[in-house]
Image (tube, rainbow, N blue to C red):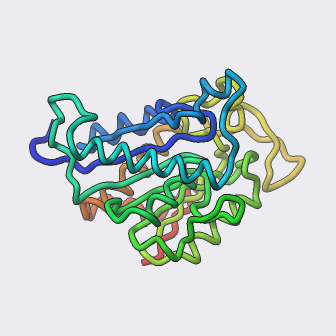
């Protein structure tokens, strides 16, 4: 483990998921010297869903989720949420937030409300969405990024176009990474479990209706997602030039279409 203060990230999980949803990403980030904290949003976890009482997708609960993230950071910075080996190791000047799906919307609201967070990344969800107010891209003044699944049959092409609109509307620096043959759960460790099927196996393309295809291999997709999340936060919180070059590089395989507004 590196010495000194560690750049710190808080993860917000998807609707009716768990804090372990992107364990592969968290492990990759930790291996690069990030302190990663993941929160279970009580009332909106997988366990709540299995009990038939998970919260609705709403602006009201989005605000509760954002407050969860802020509370967790409070506890991390005052040392009460960490083991002794990490006590006082969180760097208050290098804090980021990232989230998947409903967690991506949570990320947007946190960035708009709390200046302690210096960068944020939404995975397969827009940060600004009229169905889940009140986050606005105009209120986000720090580096932000989006991962977009081209074959996301959960939020559909409508949702993906909202992500693209967020990228165009927000204040730079902004990054957008569109991943071919990825579905809503392709980057998550829970891909294929329970109701989380939209991201593995055989499906029909939303970009070419009626055309069958096979989603990205789950282990490879998770590794790809971990690479981009790690590079994004290395570039934005550490000013790592190599990571920045990775984010804006061309990808001849055609797997990822990377865009930046700076």
Q: Position of residue 88 (x, y in %)?
A: 15, 42
**Residue 88 versus residue 155: which sits nearer the camera?**
88
Judge left or right: residue 182 versus residue 8: right
Q: Where's the N terminus, which quadrant?
A: top left
Number of numbered discs visible in the structure rendering: 0
Which residue is at a point 51% across and 60% down the rendered structure image? 109
Residue 45, above or below 178: above
Q: Where's the C terminus, which quadrant?
A: bottom left
Q: Position of residue 136 (x, y in %)?
A: 56, 70
Is residue 214 visible in the rendered structure shown here?
yes
Residue 26, above or below 4: above
Judge left or right: residue 23 versus residue 96: right
Q: Quadrant of residue 233?
A: bottom left
Q: Position of residue 202 (x, y in %)?
A: 76, 34
Is residue 249 visible in the rendered structure shown here?
no
**Residue 56 versus residue 184: which sits nearer the camera?**
56
Q: Quadrant of residue 59?
A: bottom right
Judge left or right: residue 52 versus residue 88: right
Residue 103, above or below 116: above
Judge left or right: residue 189 versus residue 23: right
Which residue is at a point 52% across and 69% down the rendered structure image? 259
């Amino acid at each position: 483990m590196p010495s000194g203060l560690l750049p710190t990230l808080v993860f917000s999980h998807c609707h009716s998921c768990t804090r372990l949803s992107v364990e592969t990403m968290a492990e990759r980030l930790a291996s690069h010297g990030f302190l990663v904290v993941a929160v279970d949003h009580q009332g909106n976890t997988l366990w709540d869903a299995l009990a038939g009482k998970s919260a609705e997708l709403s602006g009201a609960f989005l605000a509760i989720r954002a407050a969860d993230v802020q509370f967790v950071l409070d506890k991390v910075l005052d040392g009460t949420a960490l083991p002794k080996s990490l006590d006082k190791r969180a760097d208050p000047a290098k804090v980021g937030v990232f989230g998947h799906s409903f967690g991506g919307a949570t990320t947007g609201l946190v960035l708009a409300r709390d200046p302690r967070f210096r960068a944020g990344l939404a995975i397969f969800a827009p940060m600004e969405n009229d169905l889940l107010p009140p986050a606005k891209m105009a209120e986000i003044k720090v580096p932000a990024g989006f991962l977009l699944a081209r074959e996301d049959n959960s939020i559909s092409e409508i949702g993906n176009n909202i992500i693209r609109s967020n990228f165009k509307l927000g204040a730079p620096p902004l990054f957008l990474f569109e991943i071919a043959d990825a579905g809503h759960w392709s980057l998550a460790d829970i891909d294929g479990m329970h109701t989380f099927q939209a991201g593995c196996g055989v499906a029909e393309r939303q970009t070419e209706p009626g055309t069958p295809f096979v989603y990205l291999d789950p282990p490879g997709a998770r590794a790809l997602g971990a690479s981009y999340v790690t590079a994004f936060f290395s570039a934005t919180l550490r000013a790592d030039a190599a990571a920045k070059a990775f984010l804006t590089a061309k990808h001849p395989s055609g797997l990822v279409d990377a865009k930046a507004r700076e």
